[in-house]
Image (cartoon, rainbow, N blue to C red):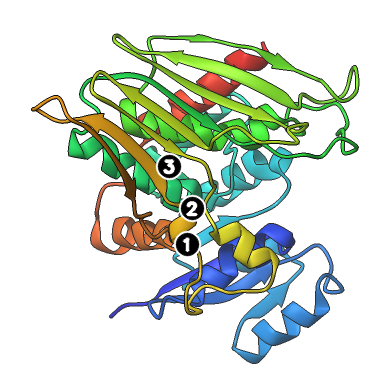
Amino acid sequence: MKKLNIAYVGFGKSTNRYHIPFVKTRENIAIKRVFVPSLDERAEERVALEAAGTEFTTDLSVIKNDPEIDLVVIVTPAPFHYAYAKELLEAGKNVLTDKPATSTLAEAEELVALANDNGLFYMPFQNRRFDSDFLTVKKVLETGYLGELTDIVVNMDHFRPDDAATVGVYDGAWYGHGVHLVDQMISLFGKPQSVAYDIRSVRKAGAADDYFNVSLRYEKFSATVAASETAALPHPKWSVYGTRGTFVKQEVDQQENDLKVGIMPGADGFGRDTAADFGELTYYNSNGDRIVKHIASEVGDYARVYDAAYAAIIDGAEKLVTDAQLLAVIETLENGVK
């Protein structure tokens, strides 16, 4: 089996929490190089990777000129995603970039065209397509229990009353959290016909937004994405309503919670819901009987984004996140801040 040799641009928390632990579960992917501004950054993690054969550099040209690198993964602060992606695509490299891919639709269109004109892979790292709660909602929708969809709501709530961010389009909840939720909806239903926005700064006037409630309107239903940084009691993660039933999932995916306490991918039970966290489905069957049942959560796995990248680059499969989906997400985000 051919190995996919990857290089990272950036070596901060996200690289070491949401990327490398998952890549280590895949034998067909090798971390060949890492670009860092300083070799003093995360020395313990760097030494461990070096012992496994990864080379670190403070010179991006080393990665650009390495013919063995199949994919460069950009995991820097968001304002640098566009510039790094453009430089690497111009150097002939396939690129997977952390979210959000860009700040504007024009930037995203430029990078998509640059990749396509040169036969290169370019895609955002939309790992929350492999959240267990999202996968479970997809399964429930596919079963037909709910009948015709009328309303679907997904929330990403936290209680961080004292963490108001500085002003900046990338610093707010809309670009930070909304990018995931909008992508989930667009992956399910496509580009919305219209969008109604409510985006605010609640904790501190003039600071970056920390609340949004945005309705993506489709022909027969609305898909609402919402988040609050001052939710002492969070909303249900998912509320899905149809003409025959309702599905409610209270709890979020467990992968991030496990990572935060040091439980790594591959460990027994990693990312798995307990029965108490399963979603509840209430529906009426063909006899008119009211049925209530708990739906076992699907198993999430963020490494499946890398599986998809491997399949696209090595095997020529279609990208997990299509260009049309990427552009629709960025357009929806940008319109929200206009």
- Residues at discs 3 and 1 in contact (Cβ within 8 Å): no
Residue at 46% from the left image edge and 37% from the top image edge: 114
Asked if residue 213 lies left or right of residue 300, the reply is right
- Where disc 1 sits, the SS reads loop
- Residues at discs 1 and 2 in contact (Cβ within 8 Å): yes
Residue 277 marker: 2
Q: Which residue type does callout 1 highlight?
A: Thr
Residue 51: x, y in percent? 66, 91
Q: Which residue type does callout 2 highlight?
A: Asp
**Which residue in the protein does label 3 denote?**
115
Report, in whole angstroms, how far the alpha carbon at label 3 lies from the one at label 1: 42 Å
Report, in whole angstroms, how far the alpha carbon at label 1 lies from the one at label 2: 5 Å
Q: Earlier in the sequence, mark 2 or mark 3?
A: 3
Residue lying furthest front: 289
**Which residue in the protein does label 1 denote?**
274
Residue at 45% from the left image edge and 45% from the top image edge: 123
Residue 148: x, y in percent? 22, 20
How many marks on residues? 3
Whether residue 146 appears in this view of the structure is yes
- Where disc 2 sits, the SS reads helix
Front tag of 2 and 3: 2
Residue 258: x, y in percent? 61, 66
Report, in whole angstroms, how far the alpha carbon at label 2 lies from the one at label 3: 42 Å
